[in-house]
Image (cartoon, helix red, strand yellow):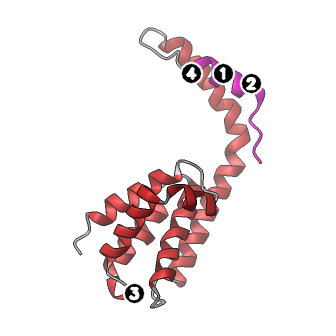
Amino acid sequence: MLKIPSIAVTIMTRLRGSIHPGSCDNIKKDLDELRRTLNSEVLDVSECLRDYTSLVDNYYSNCPPFGSGNEQKDFQDFIEIIAHSIVICNYTLLDRWAVEYPQKNQHKLAAPLAQYVHKIDGVVKTQWTALSGEYKWPPQARDYCHYLVKNLAQVRI
């Protein structure tokens, strides 16, 4: 696990709640020091996440999600794409494989796309504690689910 250097923790603690107009020069110096400190620690992790994203994207390009003919397996594909997105901390894979791909390939889904949107939305609203516990998702995973629901709901179904 990435260990955050104590100097970085000290700077972040000092900066929290202290950014306001008039403090910009001092804050900029602290942020520059923080960036330099973290940069040496996270470069390898950042490169690993880029490689991971590329591998997952390549996997789905060669082994597309959905198409099993089983609604539960299709739902599980959505869940797995969300999990990959959480690891890389962005929506790139989610947009490509959980929004764009099913939109363009609705015939591969075992149920209408709207049904998955409804199910994911329902899980977030009523079953979040169980789902997040089962998949050991951090609290921010909920944002990825909301993002998916919002973007799929905009798809013409």
Work out whether mark 4 precedes mark 1 in sequence or the reverse, and give the earlier one: 1
Q: CA distance from mark 1 to mark 3?
A: 51 Å
Mark 4 touches mark 2? (CB < 8 Å): no
Residue 14 appears left or right of 89: right
**Label 2 secondary element:** helix
Q: CA distance from mark 2 to mark 3?
A: 52 Å
Q: Which mark is residue 7?
A: 2
Q: CA distance from mark 4 to mark 1?
A: 9 Å
In this figure, which residue is indicated by the disc labeled 1? 11
Task: Relative to 15, say whether 117 is above or below.
Answer: below
Task: Relative to 21, say whether 79 is above or below.
Answer: below
Work out whether mark 1 precedes mark 3 in sequence or the reverse, and give the earlier one: 1
Residue 6: quarter of image? top right
Q: Where residue 52 sits in the image (x, y, percent)?
A: 63, 64
**Label 1 secondary element:** helix
Q: Is residue 3 magenta?
A: yes
Q: Which mark is residue 16?
A: 4
Q: Where residue 54 sits in the image (x, y, percent)?
A: 58, 67
In this figure, which residue is indicated by the disc labeled 3? 110
Q: What amino acid type is highlighted by mark number 3? A: Ala
Pair 4/2: label in front: 4
Residue drawn 52% across the image and 48% down it = 140
